[in-house]
Image (cartoon, rainbow, N blue to C red):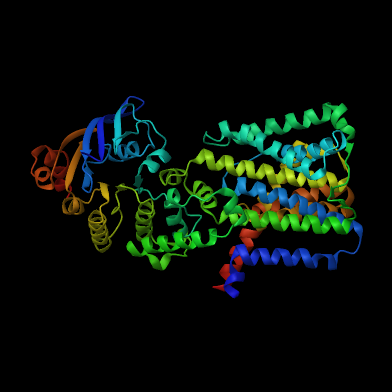
């Protein structure tokens, strides 16, 4: 039984097929990576997987529910969280508040109770804050808890994205290039973070350019090229696939 | 205690209550009280409108319409149908909330500033209806409003109204601050910060924008209703497009996404014309210049700019 089933997913932008008939299954508890050269359609695919884009064709079934065409907040409610490559931080809030918004689905408060600050509300708020602080600690940036997000360094913001996604307590977390722009030490920390996530039972879909990171953490890899699925398999299988070497690793090797 | 005062929700509210309590020391005649009461009533509208503009990131160009609905609802229900003022206030506020929901629900599902256009139209329709349905509303001549009575007690006199409006303003600010500091308020601010990330966290943008719009309409209608009873006479000018623009200007000048900014903006823009009447013919010119200069030099509004300057100094 797969947690996420993607069937013949396609997205066209005015005739350009950014994603073209991609199918794959994600097993619960696995780290599933999506790789491919620039422009292969990886981010478009992620945007389809949580409703930011509506697919031109195909189906997305998560946890037995067909979510095709649903709004992003419905994907979130179903249990899919994500981070963004080009930081989508709430810069008008503190780090802690960013994480609190991440837990939005678990922090519903009746409006009247919230506005009148009825007994119990303050305690509930304290509870949310303790949990959010816990997550900041988990990703290693608790020292920024009360800092306005627009005063935080880039590396900390990348981790804040992850903490915010984790706050949703989602069954599936989509990580969009969590190591992009990070130095080797910070990348190693992300590597360890993904492993800890996976050990905690969270299913991860990872889009990443850093091959060392991908090969180290992935249980399964899907390779995209020009919007189509080129191949898929374990890290070992993908690494030795001549088509992949030609389309992706070969190009990277030629650059180096 | 110090930490308690440093927080905006508690410390700011304490400062506001202190200002309301101490202000009468500086008010020497009824005219002063009158200006202070109008400041308070406008501030209530602005605190609500700021939830929409500053936190939900939407503009309403028809808030005077909700204000007018509250004012005329109270006036008509008490004068023509003999309703008790408190019931009339509740009913006209509920009416404004329902209208806001009906207008906002379909529009706020869309991205962009369509609400501004829709509320512009809505506000104009409300003011035309008020001006033309003269058998009910008195038309352009306006209509008299019965005083506010509750449990046999009649609110009368500038000083009594000052305390009523002061308490209502403190209550409005308290409610707004509580909302902002709750999951719903954070959802609103998140939408402003990054709509896509907020959605991905499970925030339904339409739902929360409608919520802010309805709450802001409620604040405006309550203020309108109180204004009608306080003034004892209302004219369609209260519901005019010009008044809508004034309200938006107050919020923007005071500082968007700052509840106390909305109060300061209302205070400045209500008292400034009173002070500037000394300049006679040049009044509007100077008024316009003050607005332009403050937007050029304090683009984020009075309170956020000054708060940032203070924070820099302390460092």
- When asked about the image quadrant of residue A16, the answer is top left
Considering every residue shown, the one lying at the far front of the view is B151
Which residue lies most toward the top here?
Answer: A15
| Residue in the image at 65% along x and 64% along y | B12
Count every numbered label the image shows and give the total: 0
Answer with the quarter of the image where residue B182 lies.
bottom right
Looking at the image, residue B45 lies above or below residue A93: above
**On the rendered image, what quadrant is the N terminus of chain A found in?**
top left
- The relative height of residue B287 versus residue B138 in the rendered view (above or below) is below
Residue B47 or residue B307, whichever sits in front:
B47
Residue B108, above or below B41: above
One can see residue B72 in this view: yes
Residue at x 9%, y 43% (from the top left corner): A237
Residue B93: x and y in percent read 72, 41
Relative vertical location of residue A185 with respect to residue B82 in this rendering, above or below: below
Where does the image place residue A56, in percent across and percent down from the top left?
A: 33, 26
Looking at the image, can residue B264 be seen? no
Residue found at the very far bottom of the displayed protein: B1
Q: State the image coordinates of residue B27 (x, y, percent, origin top left).
A: 86, 63
Name the spot of residue B55 as percent of width and height, x first. 57, 49
- The structure residue drawn at horizontal position 21% and vertical position 35%, both measured from the top left corner, is A24
From the viewer's perspective, is A34 left or right of B140?
left
């Amino acid at each position: 039984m797969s947690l996420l089933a993607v069937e013949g997913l396609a997205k066209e932008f005015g005739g350009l097929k950014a994603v073209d008939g991609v199918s794959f299954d994600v097993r619960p508890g696995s780290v599933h990576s999506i790789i491919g050269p620039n422009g292969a359609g990886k981010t478009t695919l992620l945007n389809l997987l949580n409703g930011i884009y509506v697919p031109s064709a195909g189906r997305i079934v998560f946890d037995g529910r067909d979510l095709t065409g649903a709004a992003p907040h419905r994907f979130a409610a179903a249990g899919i969280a994500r981070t963004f490559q080009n930081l989508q931080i709430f810069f008008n809030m503190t780090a802690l508040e960013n994480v609190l918004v991440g837990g939005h689905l678990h922090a519903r408060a009746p409006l009247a109770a919230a506005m009148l600050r009825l007994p119990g509300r303050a305690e509930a708020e304290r509870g949310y804050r303790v949990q959010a602080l816990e997550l900041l600690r988990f990703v290693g940036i608790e020292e920024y808890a009360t800092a306005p997000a627009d005063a935080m360094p880039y590396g900390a913001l990348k981790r804040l994205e992850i903490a915010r996604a984790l706050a949703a307590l989602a069954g599936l977390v989509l990580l969009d290039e969590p190591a992009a722009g990070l130095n080797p030490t910070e990348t190693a920390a992300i590597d360890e973070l993904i492993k800890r996530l996976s050990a905690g039972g969270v299913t991860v879909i990872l889009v990443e350019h850093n091959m060392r990171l991908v090969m180290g953490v992935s249980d399964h890899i899907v390779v995209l090229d020009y919007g189509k699925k080129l191949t898929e398999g374990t890290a070992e299988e993908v690494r030795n696939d001549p088509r992949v070497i030609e389309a992706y690793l070969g190009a990277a090797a030629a650059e180096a | 205690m110090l930490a308690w005062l440093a927080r905006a929700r508690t410390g700011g509210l304490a400062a506001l209550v202190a200002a309301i309590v101490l202000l009468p020391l500086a008010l020497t005649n009824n005219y002063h009280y009158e200006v202070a009461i109008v400041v308070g009533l406008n501030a209530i509208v602005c605190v609500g409108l700021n939830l929409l503009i500053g936190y939900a990131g939407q503009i309403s160009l028809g808030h005077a319409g909700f204000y007018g609905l509250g004012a005329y609802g109270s006036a008509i229900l008490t004068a023509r149908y003999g309703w008790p003022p408190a019931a009339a206030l509740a009913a006209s506020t509920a009416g404004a909330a329902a209208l806001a929901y009906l207008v906002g629900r379909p529009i706020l599902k869309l991205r962009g500033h369509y609400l501004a256009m829709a509320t512009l139209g809505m506000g104009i329709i409300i003011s035309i209806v008020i001006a033309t349905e003269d058998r009910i509303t008195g038309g352009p001549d306006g209509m008299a409003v019965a005083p506010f009575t509750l449990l046999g007690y009649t609110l009368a006199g500038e000083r009594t109204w000052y305390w009523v409006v002061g308490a209502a303003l403190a209550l409005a600010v308290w409610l707004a601050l509580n909302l902002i500091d709750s999951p719903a308020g954070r959802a609103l601010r998140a939408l402003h910060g990054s709509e896509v990330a907020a959605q991905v966290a499970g925030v339904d943008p339409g739902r929360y924008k409608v919520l802010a719009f309805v709450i802001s309409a409620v604040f405006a209608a309550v203020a309108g209703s109180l204004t009608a009873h306080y003034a004892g006479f209302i004219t369609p000018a209260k519901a005019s497009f010009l008044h809508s623009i004034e309200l938006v200007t107050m919020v923007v000048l005071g500082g968007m996404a700052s509840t106390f900014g909305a109060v300061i903006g209302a205070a400045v823009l209500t008292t400034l014309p009173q002070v500037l009447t000394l300049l006679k013919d040049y009044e509007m010119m100077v008024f316009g210049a003050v607005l332009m200069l403050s937007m050029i030099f304090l683009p984020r509004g009075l309170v956020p700019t000054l708060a940032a300057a203070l924070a820099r100094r302390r460092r």
